[in-house]
Amino acid sequence: MNRLLALAAALAFAAPLWAHEIIAGDLQIIHPHIPQPAATAKTAGGYMAIVNAGAEPDRLIGIETGIAAKSEVHESKVDANGMGTMTHVEALEIPAGGTVSLDRGGYHVMFMGLTGPLTEGEMHKAVLIFEKAGRVEIEFEIDAPMGMGEMDHMDHSTMDHSKMDHGSGD
């Protein structure tokens, strides 16, 4: 338990003063944010840290939001040859007593088919869906744009974003 408290304290001190968090039972979602994409962008990446202070693991199994036609958890990887790939992750395990960071170059939320521009300083509602904790309402803060981000060098050839389901998001 002391390790968990030390980790939580380290995250609190490492996070910028403007960071926000949401507590839902044993889960703590720290600073869900989206770096501002270009005004004409059709995709964006969302990032946060999820801390599970509980005695059992949980799994992030879905994301709902009105800012995009489709939202999924993806994992970015770079192979030994420097080729970047991105793959959809059906469920992301949040281990008991652990923290999972959704960050550049790793796990992240992929927003596909943005419904409009995202402007720095805005807050956009979303729902994270966990296997055990259920539906957790959050807000993604639109942060300052990133320079060359992971989207600029990823190999999207394995992801067919052009054939997205533009249905109701169910």
Image: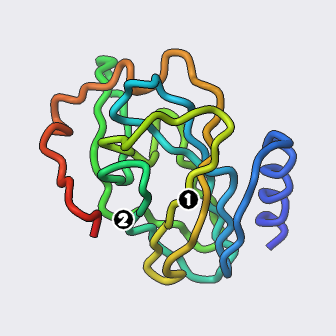
Q: Is residue 87 left or right of residue 21?
A: left
Point 42% across, 62% down: residue? 63
Q: Amino acid at mark 1?
A: Lys
- Reading the image, the residue beneath label 2 is 91
The numbered mark, 2 or 1, whose residue comes first in the sequence reads: 2
| Label disc, if present, on residue 125 of the rendered structure | 1
The residue tagged with tag 2: helix, strand or loop? Answer: loop
The spot of residue 55 in percent (x, y) is 63, 83
- Which color mode does the image show? rainbow
Badge 1 density bin: few <14, some 14–19, many ≥20, Cα 10 Å: few
Residue 147 falls in image quadrant: top right
The spot of residue 53 in percent (x, y) is 69, 74
* Image position of 97 with respect to 147: above or below: below
Q: Nearer the viewer, residue 149 or 5?
A: 149
Q: Return the residue found at the far left.
A: 163
Whole-number angstrom distance, CA of label 2 to CA of label 1: 21 Å
Residue 9 falls in image quadrant: bottom right
